[in-house]
Image: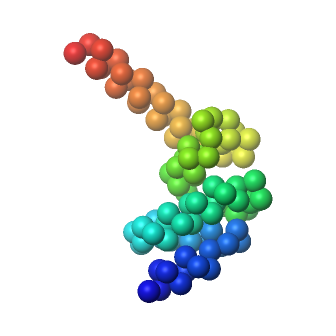
């Protein structure tokens, strides 16, 4: 019941905060609705709206928003996200090489 009320209150001013805490508390429907609002309102959000989000959450947002999440992370000056994206890409390359050898 509370989750549904919170979903109805999501707006561009609180969507990132609700996304962060719904992730931590594993409130899936609220998390999904918050992420959808972030993606829909992305161009209207400011850098300070994302300050509370850790790099893993930003990776998820950037990857959901664009085919070029690395470019977005660089534009936003998020070196932590750039690092995670590069590590993720390198890990994928290593997994591909391992599969090709077998």
Quadrant containing the N terminus in the rendered view: bottom left
Q: Is residue 34 above or below residue 4?
A: above
Is 70 placed left or right of 84 in the picture? right
Q: Is residue 13 above or below residue 67?
A: below
Q: Residue at x 53, y 84 (%)?
A: 5
Is residue 52 in sight in this rendering?
Answer: no
Residue, far bottom: 1
Quadrant containing the C terminus in the rendered view: top left
Q: Is residue 102 above or below residue 87?
A: above
Q: Residue at x 70, y 68 (%)?
A: 12
- What is the x, y in percent for residue 18? 56, 71
Is 17 placed left or right of 24 in the picture? right
The way the protein has been coloured in the rendering is rainbow
Is 13 placed left or right of 65 in the picture? right
Q: Which sits in the foreground, 67 or 71?
A: 67
* Circle count: 0
- What is the x, y in percent for residue 21? 50, 71
- What is the x, y in percent for residue 67? 60, 36
Q: Residue at x 28, y 20 (%)?
A: 99
Is residue 21 in sight in this rendering?
Answer: yes
Q: Residue at x 53, y 55 (%)?
A: 57
- What is the x, y in percent for residue 26? 40, 69
């Amino acid at each position: 019941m509370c989750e549904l009320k919170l979903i109805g209150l999501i707006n561009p001013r609180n969507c990132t905060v609700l996304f962060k805490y719904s992730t931590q508390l594993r409130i899936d429907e609220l998390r999904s609705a918050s992420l959808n609002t972030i993606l829909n309102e992305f161009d209207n959000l400011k850098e300070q709206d994302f300050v509370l989000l850790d790099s893993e959450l930003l990776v998820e947002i950037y990857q959901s928003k664009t085919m070029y999440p690395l470019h977005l992370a660089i534009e936003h000056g998020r070196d932590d996200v750039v690092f995670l994206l590069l590590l993720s890409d390198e890990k994928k390359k290593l997994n591909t090489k391992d599969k090709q050898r077998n």
